[in-house]
Image (cartoon, rainbow, N blue to C red):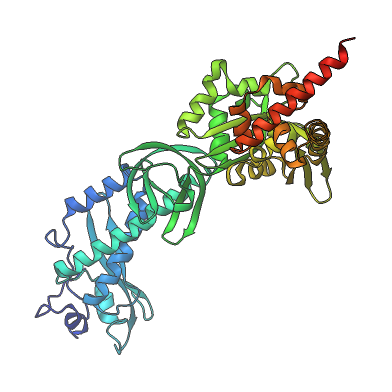
Amino acid sequence: MIAVHYPGEDAQAGFKARVGFIPLFFVWRPDDFMISELKALFDYYEKEKGIDRAKMVDALSQALLAASKKSIGPARELRIEIDPDKGTIKAFAKLLAVETVSNPWEEMALATARRIKKNAELGDEIDIEVTPKNMGRIAAQTAKQTMLQRLRQAEKENLYDEFKDRTGDVVSGVVRRFDKSDVIVDLGKFEGMMTGKERVSTEDYNVGDRMRFYVKAVEKDGSRGPEIVLSRAHPNFVRRLFEFEVSEIADRTVEIASIAREAGYRTKVAVNSADEKVDPVGACVGLRGARVKNIVRELNNEKVDIIRWKSDPAEFVREALKPIKVMSIKVDPDKKQVQLTVAEEDLSKAIGRRGQNARLTSRLVGMDLIIEKDEHEAEVFEGQLGGAAKVLVDGLGITVEVARKLVQNGLMDVSMFSQVDADDLTEMLDGDRALAEQIIVKAQSVAGAAAEAIVP
């Protein structure tokens, strides 16, 4: 090749010069972009971040190409060649050999072309080096910053390639920082993000905490590029913890049939086994509760109920609501609805605080639950209450209202008043001392009359 020096520092002016149409050739100076720094950058990203060196060379080439055009001009088919081992960077253009040059950015005289390539003919493409000597530190720094941006993009693409098949896994990571309500987690080579809705409301997260997370998704086209979406609130996080902790689940001797969770508060897990010799609930609980305790500890003391799965929806609902006794139950498979009744004192327990127990049971069974108090039992009790009250009304000459108060306090018969003093009776009657004493006198009178009738 023939090097022709141009006057001045402007590479564009040199390129446009008519003397041979061949610019000055030289390698990018170390003071613009240190060779050792470039090689160190390649080594770091390749070893520490796992990014292929060829991807880095391509990223840097594209970045320097954009920066070089400012100094070289619109040269035809401008390209950048990088030797990653030597750390050298050169720029080349591909000009057409013509008889008369009309566009110095794209053409060179045939005579000049033959000084580079002896057998050049009209229309041949001639490669010439156009590495600019006056790119300067600003252009170099711009190229470096652009390259780093491209490398970060390549790193995220590498993240997707490595994690795309790990959706559903549980990984361990360290809380590194917070982005509004999102938690950024260091997973080693990569970072994962746990959004606000994937956090557990009862848990506190602090920088430096090491925790386990469920990989909910690996999104290739997230708002910030490829992202690893983590969760500690997902129901499958509990499922995977059981798989780790319970060997019978891992080898499929025991199966998790369904799971319902309100993260941080309570989880219901229905388990089943095709092997009649295996107790699925006992296998999950473990010796002295050791297995389930480890899971509860990981979930920061979230309550975990382990339930035996039943193929019959009615029996399944009874199992899921234990120890609450279901008085009656009716299943409508078409509407996917279960209507059941419980004793009045069990109604609040069956529904649970803010409806939690009913919601979890509904999700576990896969049907809507309608829970009502058992009216039949109430009717029976009301009948018994009314019968006892009538006995007192007839025997003591009191009103039905007063009689019902006394029956509700356990005084079902006139003979029982001999065991009650005036103070206790006054309290039952909302502080009416006079009425209490009157009833005691009447009860004693009735009891005396009954005794005289017995004596012959």
Q: Residue at x 81, y 30 (%)?
A: 395
Residue furthest to the left = 8
Which residue, as the protein is rendered here, is positioned at the far right?
A: 456
Counting every numbered tag in the picture gives 0
Picture coordinates of residue 412, whole percent (x, y): 76, 27
Quadrant into which the C terminus falls: top right
Residue 286 in view, yes or no: yes
Residue 224 or 138: which is nearer the viewer? Answer: 224
Outermost residue toward the top in this view: 456
In x, y percent, where is residue 340? 78, 41
Residue 48 x/y as whole percent? 31, 42
**Is 22 or 132 nearer to us in this picture?**
132
Residue that appears at 64% across and 40% down: 348
Q: Nearer the viewer, residue 230 or 135?
A: 230
Residue 411 seen in render: no
- Quarter of the rendering containing residue 356: top right
**Image quadrant occupied by the N terminus:** bottom left
Q: Nearer the viewer, residue 15 or 208?
A: 208
- Quadrant of the rendered structure where residue 402 is? top right
Q: Relative to 276, say whether 25 is above or below.
A: below
Q: Residue at x 54, y 16 (%)?
A: 288
146 up-or-down from 438: above or below: below
Residue 358 image-quadrant placement = top right
339 vs 321, left or right, is: right
Depicted 276 relative to depicted 326: above or below = above
Q: Is residue 398 left or right of residue 33?
A: right
Q: Position of residue 70 (x, y in %)?
A: 24, 76
